[in-house]
Image (cartoon, rainbow, N blue to C red):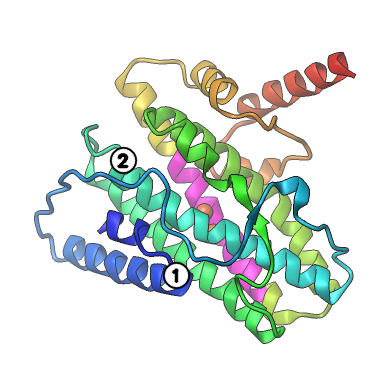
């Protein structure tokens, strides 16, 4: 099921299949059925539609958020992130099936994939209400980088994807909601508030399973987190952090502040 979603190119078709399979999984779990996880070979890159054109982030035109064009660009960028997140969550399910994990691991990522599918559809609806659509603008080409870098390291994947990238979403979404509040676009505000509320869980699932694996291998979570982020994440962690939501999601300050300080020192040394 995970691989079928990854192999579907069209965004709306991908998310429809994702939601259908999530409902199937959840119904089977609710009925107490025995589910075999099985093994699968996920593609190196998920199938994607012909549009949007994928560009180096430097070449993606920057528009002012105060303008309609800027608001469309912002929603388009979020739609792109959500579609990538659908693939990331199904990928973690398929890619690490050789690691024995409790069924709860799969419950969490199936639920996350289902929510990302809903988020993508919400963003597409908002774009269409504003006379645009997903694919109308170019998008960020580097989104699958974190998946490639951590394709052989489950703990690295958990550290970088939910605990760094999705946690970053918690930092920036309130500011985005304000942009749409100021523009009096209540549909976009409501959609982003759904996303903001649900993303906390994805970060929390990351933290939960990261700590689970640290416990299994008798590792110190904070030190291992720092090592994995240094190894696999190239962007640096940038404040301001949403410390309250991060705490709610099980990411304490000593996980991210040392990495942020380190990066700003390295930046100062270079300049
Ligand atoms: Fe999302
Ligand atoms: Fe998410």
Residue 65: percent from left, percent from top: 85, 65
Q: Main secondary structure of the magenta part?
A: helix
Q: Are marks 2 and 1 in contact (CB under 8 Å)?
A: no
192 within the magenta span:
yes
Residue 270: percent from left, percent from top: 85, 16
Q: Quadrant of residue 61?
A: bottom right
Q: Is residue 267 left or right of residue 224?
A: right
Residue at image coords 31%, 40%: 95
Can the viewer see residue 211? no
Q: Is residue 15 left or right of residue 170?
A: left
The residue where tag 1 is placed is: 10
Residue at image coords 73%, 80%: 186
Residue 125: percent from left, percent from top: 59, 80
Q: What distance separates the C-alpha of mark 2 from that of mark 1?
A: 22 Å
145 within the magenta span:
no
Q: Which residues are magenta?
A: 190-207
Residue 48, above or below 243: below
Q: How many marks?
A: 2
The numbered disc on residue 218 is none
Residue at image coords 36%, 44%: 92
Dot 2 or dot 1: first in sequence order is: 1
The local crowd at label 1, few if under 14, some if 14 to 19, many if 20 or more residues have their Cα within 10 Å, is some
Q: Which residue extends farthest left?
A: 34
Residue at image coords 78%, 70%: 71
Q: Quadrant of the C terminus?
A: top right
Residue 98, above or below 198: above
Element type at marker 1? loop
Residue 102: percent from left, percent from top: 23, 40
The residue where tag 2 is placed is: 95
């Amino acid at each position: 099921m995970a691989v079928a979603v990854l192999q579907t190119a069209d965004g709306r078709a991908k998310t429809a299949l994702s939601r259908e399979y999530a409902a199937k999984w959840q119904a089977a779990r609710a009925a107490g059925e025995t589910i075999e996880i099985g093994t699968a070979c996920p593609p190196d890159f998920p199938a994607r539609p012909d549009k949007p054109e994928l560009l180096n982030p430097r070449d993606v035109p920057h528009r002012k958020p105060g303008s309609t064009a800027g608001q469309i660009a912002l929603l388009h960028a979020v739609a792109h992130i959500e579609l990538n997140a659908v693939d990331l969550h199904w990928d973690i399910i398929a890619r690490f099936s050789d690691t024995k994990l409790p069924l709860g691991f799969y419950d969490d990522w199936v639920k996350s994939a289902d929510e990302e599918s809903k988020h993508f559809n919400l963003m597409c609806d908002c774009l269409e209400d504003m006379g645009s659509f997903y694919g109308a603008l170019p998008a960020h080409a580097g989104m699958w980088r974190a998946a490639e870098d951590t394709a052989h390291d489950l703990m690295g994947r958990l550290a970088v994807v939910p605990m760094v990238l999705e946690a970053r979403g918690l930092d920036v979404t309130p500011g985005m909601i304000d942009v749409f509040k100021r523009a009096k676009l209540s549909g976009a505000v409501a959609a982003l508030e759904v996303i903001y509320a649900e993303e906390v869980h994805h970060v929390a699932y990351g933290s939960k399973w990261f700590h689970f694996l640290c416990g299994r291998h008798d590792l110190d979570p904070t030190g291992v987190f720092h090592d994995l982020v240094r190894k696999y994440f190239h962007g640096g962690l940038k404040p301001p952090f949403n410390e309250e939501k991060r705490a709610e999601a099980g990411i304490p300050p000593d996980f991210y502040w040392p990495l942020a300080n380190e990066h700003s020192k390295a930046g100062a040394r270079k300049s």
